[in-house]
Amino acid sequence: MIEVRRPSEDELKKLNVESWPVWTKEKSKFDWYYDEKETCYIIEGEVIVRTKDGKEVRFKAGDLVVFPKGLSCEWEILKDVKKHYRFG
């Protein structure tokens, strides 16, 4: 299950999100598979992720998102995305 929440500034500092790598992608649609857990903080953009079992999760700038290992899904980027991310 994909976890989406709005973290506090304190939580972001404790996670040291600013030190994580940054990934950017333009408006697009593509399939993705998570071979390990990924935690990301959305800096800019808006995304819908559709899981293979038909669930839809929407997130945007300011959200902390956790994708579980083994998730197969489709990303639809509605607004160009920029995120900090960490695997494991």
Image (cartoon, rainbow, N blue to C red):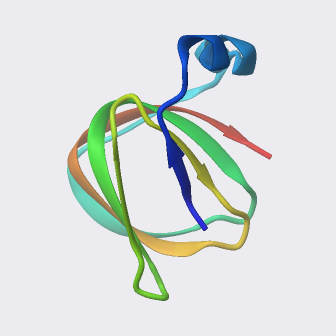
In the rendered image, which quarter is residue 13 located in? Answer: top right
Height in image: 39 above or below 74?
above
Q: Quadrant of residue 39?
A: top right
The residue shown at (24%, 58%) is 28
| Extreme-right residue of the structure | 88
Task: Name the residue: 68% across, 62% down.
Answer: 68
Residue 75 placement: quadrant = bottom left
Q: In the figure, 3 relative to 53: above or below?
A: above
Percent x, y of residue 42 = 43, 33
Q: Is residue 60 left or right of residue 65?
A: left
Q: Which quarter of the rendering shows the N terminus?
A: bottom right
Residue at point 65% right, 19% down? 11
In the visual, does 48 lie left or right of 88?
left
Give the vertical position of 74 relative to 76 (above or below): below
Q: Residue furthest bottom?
A: 53
The location of residue 37, given as percent across then percent down, is: 73, 55
Residue 64 screen position, x and y as percent: 52, 37
Residue 28 to residue 54: above or below: above
